[in-house]
Image: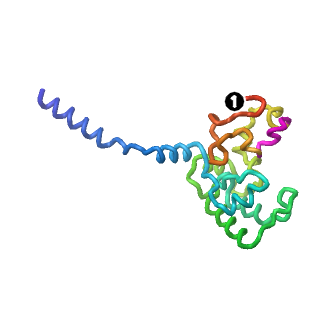
């Protein structure tokens, strides 16, 4: 009987010691974001320049090669001249490269990278196979023909936490339709 209690106590103690350290609230948030999102855009230069026309897309939504191509074509950026001064160009390019999907350990960034072939260089986030697949069940009328959305490139129209890098289904609310859950 004493041996059984001693063995049970030893096993219980070992199990307790193997339990991971309790996460703080900040650690839990970071873990959740890494598991369902991408790193948020944090560069002041990037946010200032890019969000003047559209959402400052998190760099983890495209690989470095795509951001380089986008930055190289700012004079004709999707029909607009988005050229910036040399210092801003350098800061933003470095930020995008350092935080691109191919350099990220965030799960959604990794899924985006797995969906691309090695020679793919998408310049539209909405053209990546992963993003297309994630939106393929949503009827066109809720996106393209919805005046408050118009395109899956308008992430923050439906994803309430897009600018924080969170794109999980819990935060999806399609204007004029409501919560989306597939």
Q: Residue at x 77, y 42 (%)?
A: 152
Which colour assignment does the render follow? Answer: rainbow
Instruction: Specify the principal SS of the magenta part.
Output: loop
Q: Judge whether 50 appears above or below 126 on screen.
A: below
Q: Which residues are magenta?
A: 145-153
Which of 4 and 43 lies nearest the eye of the viewer?
43
* Few, some or many residues within 10 Å of mark 1 (<14, 14–19, 20+): some
Circle 1 — which element? strand
Which of 104 and 3 lies nearest the eye of the viewer?
104
Q: Quadrant of the C terminus?
A: top right
Based on the picture, tell me whether residue 147 belongs to the magenta stretch.
yes
Q: Residue at x 37, y 45 (%)?
A: 21
Judge left or right: residue 39 versus residue 122: left
Tell me which corner region of the image, top left, top right, bottom left or bottom right, holds residue 150: top right
Where residue 123 appears, as percent x and y from the top left, is 77, 55
Q: Residue at x 74, y 55 (%)?
A: 51
Residue placed furthest toward the bottom: 86
Where residue 181 appears, as percent x and y from the top left, is 67, 29
Q: Quadrant of the N terminus?
A: top left
Where residue 142 appears, as percent x and y from the top left, is 80, 33
Q: Which residue in the structure is indicated by mark 1?
A: 179
Where residue 130 appears, as percent x and y from the top left, is 69, 44
Based on the picture, tell me whether residue 181 belongs to the magenta stretch.
no
């Amino acid at each position: 009987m004493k041996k059984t209690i001693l063995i049970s106590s030893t096993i219980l103690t070992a199990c307790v010691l193997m339990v991971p350290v309790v996460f703080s609230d900040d650690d839990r948030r970071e873990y959740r974001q890494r598991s369902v999102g991408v790193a948020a855009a944090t560069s002041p230069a990037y946010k200032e320049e890019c969000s003047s026309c559209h959402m400052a897309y998190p760099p983890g939504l495209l690989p470095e090669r795509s951001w380089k191509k986008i930055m190289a074509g700012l004079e004709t950026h999707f029909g607009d001249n988005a050229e910036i001064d040399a210092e801003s160009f350098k800061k933003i390019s470095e930020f995008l490269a350092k935080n691109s999907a191919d350099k990220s350990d965030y799960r959604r960034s990794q899924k985006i990278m797995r969906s691309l072939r090695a020679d793919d260089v998408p310049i539209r986030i909405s053209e990546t196979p992963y993003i297309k697949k994630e939106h393929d069940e949503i009827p066109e009328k809720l996106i393209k023909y919805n005046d408050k959305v118009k395109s899956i490139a308008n992430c923050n129209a439906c994803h309430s936490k897009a600018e924080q890098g969170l794109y999980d289904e819990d935060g999806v609310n399609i204007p004029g339709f409501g919560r989306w859950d597939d």
